[in-house]
Amino acid sequence: MAVDVVCVASWNVDLIAHIPQPLERGQTRMAQAFDRLPGGKGSNAAIAAARQGAQVGLIARIGGDDFGQMGLDLWARESIDSQHVLRGAGETNGTALILVYEDGDNSIAVYPGAGAGLTAAHVQAATGMLAQARVVMASCEVPLAATLAAFEIARAHGVLTLLNPAPATPLPDALWPLVDVLTPNEGELLMLADAPDIETAALCLLQRGVGALVVTLGERGCALFRPDAAPLWVPGHAMQVVDTIGAGDTFTGTLAAQLAQQSPWPQALRWANAAAALSTQAQGAVTAMPARSQVQAWLHSG
Ligand code: RIB
């Protein structure tokens, strides 16, 4: 099956406890609720793209345990191609420990488990799938060598590359010129550029070789920065937030699907903003991720 979007993906099971406020060091509290739900920035973005109508393929390494099987079952339900997903026999799957607070904000600790074993050789074995895609995306939850290998193959075959630099981590000079589209949130952008404001930081990363930068700003929307073009600010949506887990991944995956369909930037960003806003309307990363028809109906009704 030909795929439009390939995701070099992390797959975590999210163990989510709801407490009123952040814990203090050394503090124990009784949680008000608990959920065990699908997560992982890569898998989340892949599902967002698939729900927007893209044919999606994964390159990933998952545990040999029940959590690994959960991923395979989920991707089968979402019609995502998992032929390049490897299982580490006897290895623990990626797991995210998440605290959600009463204002909808959260804190997350990610243990990558088997995902840390994803290598460049594993990615290179999927060259056929990468070379015929329209967009190849990754996040900083997968090993950097895997992302570099995927983006080098993409570049050699004229495939658009998209990096969600989350969780924010220092990145090597060799990566920046291989990134066609970067989707940091505001905090990640300022950290990566070591700059005091959005405009300065965006210029800095464009000068390092990034092709286009989209900073996500929550309910303030997003802004697109490109060399030799005026910034494009796209307003967001004020929502009664239930849960923001996965909203950034929904934005990235939806943007990937839109770019794979060769939508113009204003439409692609409007669509990604809307999908991310809708994704905040239920608990967990993928529960409320909308289908294309839902985004369309919501945008037309608003
Ligand atoms: O972006 C949200 C995701 O971050 C969660 O699903 C969790 O698994 C972590 O990867």
Image (cartoon, rainbow, N blue to C red):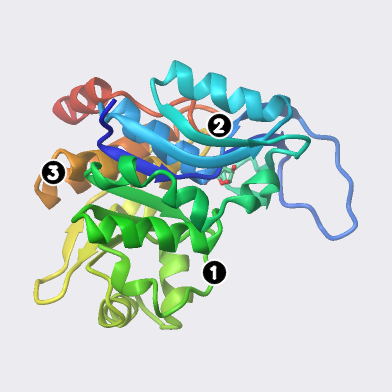
> Where on the picture, by quarter, is residue 86?
top right
34 relative position to 257: left or right: right
Circle 2: residue type: Gly
Mark 1 secondary-structure assignment: loop
Of 75 and 188, the residue lying toward us: 75
Q: Where does residue 141 sit, x and y in percent of width and height?
A: 55, 54
Q: For the point 44% across and 58% down, which residue is it?
A: 147
Label 1 CA crowd tier, 10 Å (few <14, some 14–19, many 20+):
few
Q: Is residue 291 above or below residue 90?
A: above
The image position of residue 150, as x and y in percent, is 39, 55
Residue beneath label 1, please? 169
**Circle 3 sits on which residue?**
267
Q: Position of residue 251 (x, y in %)?
A: 34, 44
Identify residue type, mark 3: Gln
- For residue 217, which quarter of the picture? bottom left
The quadrant in which the C terminus is found is: top left
- Disc 2 and disc 1: Cα gap in Å? 24 Å
Q: Earlier in the sequence, mark 2 or mark 1?
A: 1
| Disc 2 residue lies near ligand 1 with CB under 8 A | yes
The Cα atoms of the two marked residues, 1 and 3, are separated by: 30 Å
Residue 140 coordinates in the image, percent (x, y) = 51, 58
Query: Which residue position holds label 2?
Result: 284
- Tell me which corner region of the image, top left, top right, bottom left or bottom right, holds residue 24: bottom right
**Mark nearer the N terminus (2 vs 3):** 3
Q: Who's the residue at 65% across and 30% down the image?
A: 68
**Kind of residue indicated by mark 1:** Thr
